[in-house]
Amino acid sequence: MTFPTTIFSKLDTPFYYYDLDILNQTLKAIHAETDHRKNFHVHYAIKANANPGILEIIAQSGLGADCVSGGEIEAADMAGFDGQKIVYAGVGKSDKEIRIALEKGIFCFNVESLPELEVINEIAHEMGKKAHVAFRINPNVDAHTHAKITTGLNENKFGIAMEDMIPAIRKAESLDAVEYTGLHFHIGSQILDLSVYVALCDRINELQDILDKEGIQTANINVGGGLGIDYDNPDGNPIPNFKEYFELFEEHLKLREGQQLHFELGRSVVAQCGSLIARTLYVKEGHTKKFVIVDAGFTELVRPAMYGSHHFTQNLSAANDAPKDKYDVVGPICESSDVFSTDEVLPITHRGDFIAFRSAGAYGEVMASTYNCRQLPEAYFSE
Ligand SMILES: *Cc1c(COP(=O)(O)O)cnc(C)c1O
């Protein structure tokens, strides 16, 4: 990826920079794997990045939307996503959010508990509507990823246990304003070990056998999202391996006649197109360490502080062959967790140098906060 640093020098930092070429190539790669598989449907997970400009491009490409709040349903609607392609998950849907979803006529509620099912039924009944529901089932598959982003294990707040699947479906059948239309799964995020998805397919196949025996028909299977990206080498691997990912489901999942397969990809769609751009404020020489103090912090990009993740870091102002040194790259926020990386090898860095934190398009701008009375970052797009 190249950065227009001449343009950057006229801008206030920190800000997000989105390379739309990468975004469009990513979308093209997804469509290349899904357009000819007519029963495959991809819903972009809005929570990864809800920047209106990004959302519009994704909506125009024809993907659906995966929302986890009423606000996201409204953002999806504003960006032009087809309401009929919106799925809505979340353990704590409020009455108001359920009403918004019913008004927009979304494709499906991914229901995470029986009390929620009853409330959706009541509200839909009162509005004279029928809510399409899928049950989010907890498949007890370990995503082999960070503890804070593993969601498919039994002792998790998300979803309904497998043993409760049949009673939940029976309950839905007994209610007048909901219709059972599918099963939903989402086992975690930043999954690079694709055998985890094979385990998910095996588990879904088992569950489908049980449903067959009960004579229950299921129109939709939704396998959620979670496909990981290469944080270490964004320029080497700008586009995730969608081919292998989608082929895996085609190979391992035993879909029934007419069954539709849904995906909810977030990070893999938007992570590589975004970078957080900061300026170096100070280079501080400690006794044992050197610090690059930049004007961005966890208020702009919280992933390092929250998940201990590392973003590939580049000094955009230094020459390629400049001699290097080792730095801790830190932000200005008054918390010791405000550290982007330790022992980062960078070209010798000076005050004023632009620092790019790469692969920040997912769970970056959308998680920014105003802590320390800071302003939310601006976003700029490549031509
Ligand atoms: C967050 C989330 C996703 C997207 O996850 P990624 O790891 O960004 O692909 C999909 N489905 C649900 C229900 C989610 O909560």
Image: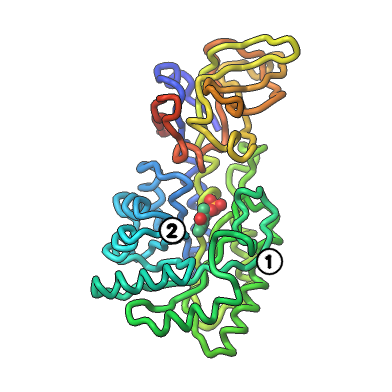
Query: As displayed, is residue 37 above or below residue 194?
Result: below
Q: Give how far across and how far down residue 37 sits, in percent.
A: 51, 69
Q: What label sits on residue 198 in the rendered view?
A: 1
Which residue is drawn at the image coordinates 54% and 48% (left, top)?
267
Q: Give how far across and how far down residue 378 sits, in percent.
A: 39, 29
Can residue 63 be seen?
Answer: no
Query: As displayed, is residue 353 above or below residue 235?
Result: above
Q: Is residue 227 left or right of residue 175?
A: right
Q: Earlier in the sequence, mark 2 or mark 1?
A: 2
Which residue is drawn at the image coordinates 67% and 17% (left, top)?
347
Mark 2 crowdedness (10 Å alpha carbons): few <14, some 14-19, many ≥20: some
Q: Give how far across and how far down residue 71 sits, in percent.
A: 34, 50
Q: What label sits on residue 209 in the rendered view?
A: none
| The one of 306 and 12 positioned closer to us in this rendering | 306
Cα gap from disc 2 to disc 1, whole angstroms: 29 Å
Q: What label sits on residue 92 in the rendered view?
A: 2
Which residue is drawn at the image coordinates 57% and 33% (left, top)?
358
Can residue 89 be seen?
Answer: yes
Q: Give how far across and how far down residue 126 sits, in percent.
A: 25, 72
Which residue is drawn at the image coordinates 30% and 69% (left, top)?
123
Residue at disc 2, secondary structure:
loop
